[in-house]
Image (cartoon, rainbow, N blue to C red):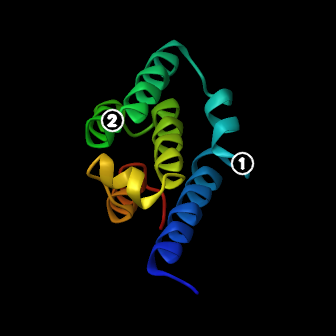
Amino acid sequence: MYHRSDWILRQIEDAIALAIQFAFKSGAPVEEVVEQVFDAQTGDLLYTLREMLKKSEFSDAENLVFEHLRPGNLPALALALWFYDQLKSLTEDELARGDFSREEITQGLDDVCTMYGIPQ
C-alpha cells in the first residue's frame, strides 16, 4: 500500500538529488559531495550536527544549519543537504521524538533551494 509518508519521502529524495545536480553538477550521493567540499568549518559543523541528531535535537540543528547558509557558500549547502538526507532516513517515531515531521523536512529543503536559487 502506498502511503502519504512514502510520497513525501520520495519528494525529499528528489529535491536533494536535484539540488546536488544543480549546485554541484554532480549525480553523486550527498555524502560524497560533502567530502568534496569539506573544510575546517564544515568539519566542525558536521560533528556538531551529528551529535544533535543523535540527541533528537532536530529543530535546534536545523536552526544551526540556517545560521551558516549564505548564497555562494557551497560547503554549507552541502551540509544542509546532508542534514535533510539524514532526517529523511529517520522513522516517523524517531522524528516525533524530536518534535519534527516530514513536512518540516520538505519545507526546510524548499527554503534552502530558494536561498541558493535552485529550481524546485
Name the one closer to the observer, 90 or 12. 90
Name the one closer to the observer, 95 or 63. 95
Answer few, some or many: residues within 10 Å of disc 2's Cα (few below 14, many 20 plus, some between 14 and 19): some
Name the one closer to the observer, 80 or 8. 8
Q: Secondary structure at mark 2?
A: helix
The picture quadrant where one finds residue 92 is bottom left
Counting from the top left corner in percent of width and height, residue 99 is at 26, 51
Identify the residue shown where x is 35% and y is 39%: 56
Q: Is residue 43 above or below residue 117?
A: above
Numbered tag placed on residue 61 in the rendering:
2
Counting from the top left corner in percent of width and height, residue 64 is at 30, 32
Q: How many marks overall? A: 2
View extreme (bottom): residue: 1
Q: Is residue 98 left or right of residue 13?
A: left
Identify the residue shown where x is 43% and y is 22%: 45
Residue bearing mark 1? 26
Q: Amino acid at mark 2?
A: Ala
Q: Secondary structure at mark 1?
A: loop
**Picture quarter with the N terminus:** bottom right
Identify the residue shown where x is 26% and y is 38%: 63
Name the one closer to the observer, 45 or 51. 51
Q: Amino acid at mark 1?
A: Ser
Counting from the top left corner in percent of width and height, residue 55 is at 36, 32
Q: Is residue 32 left or right of residue 88?
A: right
Counting from the top left corner in percent of width and height, residue 54 is at 43, 32
The picture quadrant where one finds residue 17 is bottom right
Marks 2, 1: nearer the viewer: 2
Answer few, some or many: residues within 10 Å of disc 1's Cα (few below 14, many 20 plus, some between 14 and 19): some
> Decide: marks 2, 1 in contact (CB < 8 A)?
no
Lower position in the chain sequence, tag 2 or tag 1: 1
